[in-house]
Image (cartoon, rainbow, N blue to C red):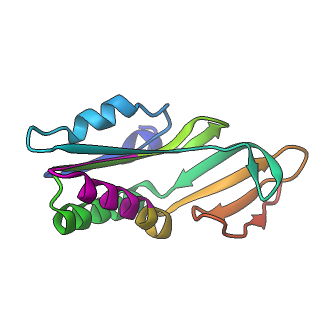
Amino acid sequence: MDPQEQEIWELSEGDCYVALTKDHLDAQAIIDRVRSPAAGAIVLFAGTTRDTFAGKPVKELQYSAYNKLALRTMLSITKGLESKHGLKGIAMIHRLGTVPIGEESILIAVSSPHRQAAWRAGEEALEECKAKVEVWKREEFDGEDGVWRANRDGAIGEKASS
């Protein structure tokens, strides 16, 4: 059996769902995962590949992860936020592989009885994901070698060897 077929691509527990995929991300599908008749608010965050970083033109991003560990970390984050904010559902999906300009690399959906908890939980989910989840990105620049960096905003990367 192909080793990739043996990899774990999603986990769920209660109202928490996390996934990694090499496919395009579907905003409606993740919203539907957290939909609840007890929720008066659903917040969706979509992180997209922008065309520049630090003034340099970005060609694309490439993401890689240690799936099993990344998913466990993602599930731990969602479970903690579900409890902390009294959420009705929380889902996080991160795309791996090549993500072209303008396409989504991460979707986070949160539902709660009231909007304030959903807003806060959505932002905290993204910040914790960037700080803790075992996902790495390689920025490909036009006319330059790519740069690997931890998946954190503004962190300085290192030139990757060809």
Q: Toward the viewer: 54 or 7?
A: 54
Residue shown at 17% from the left, 43% from the top: 40
Q: Give the answer, above or below, for where 78 lies relative to 49.
A: below
Left or right: where 96 falls relative to 75: right
Of residues 18 and 47, the one drawn nearer to the viewer in this rendering:
47
In this view of the protein, which residue sits in the foreground, 3 or 107? 107
From the image, which quarter does the C terminus lie in?
bottom right
Image side of residue 117 versus residue 156, left or right: left
* Res 124 → quadrant: bottom left
Instruction: State which region is magenta.
Output: 108-126
Would you place residue 55 above or below residue 155 in this image? above
Q: Residue at x 26, y 43 (%)?
A: 42
* Dominant secondary-structure state across the stretch colored magenta: helix
Is residue 18 something that shows in the picture? no
Q: How many marks?
A: 0
> Could you tell me which residue is drawn at 9 percent across and 38 percent down?
37
Nearer to the camera, 12 or 122: 122
Give the x, y percent position of residue 157: 73, 67
Q: Quadrant of residue 30?
A: top left
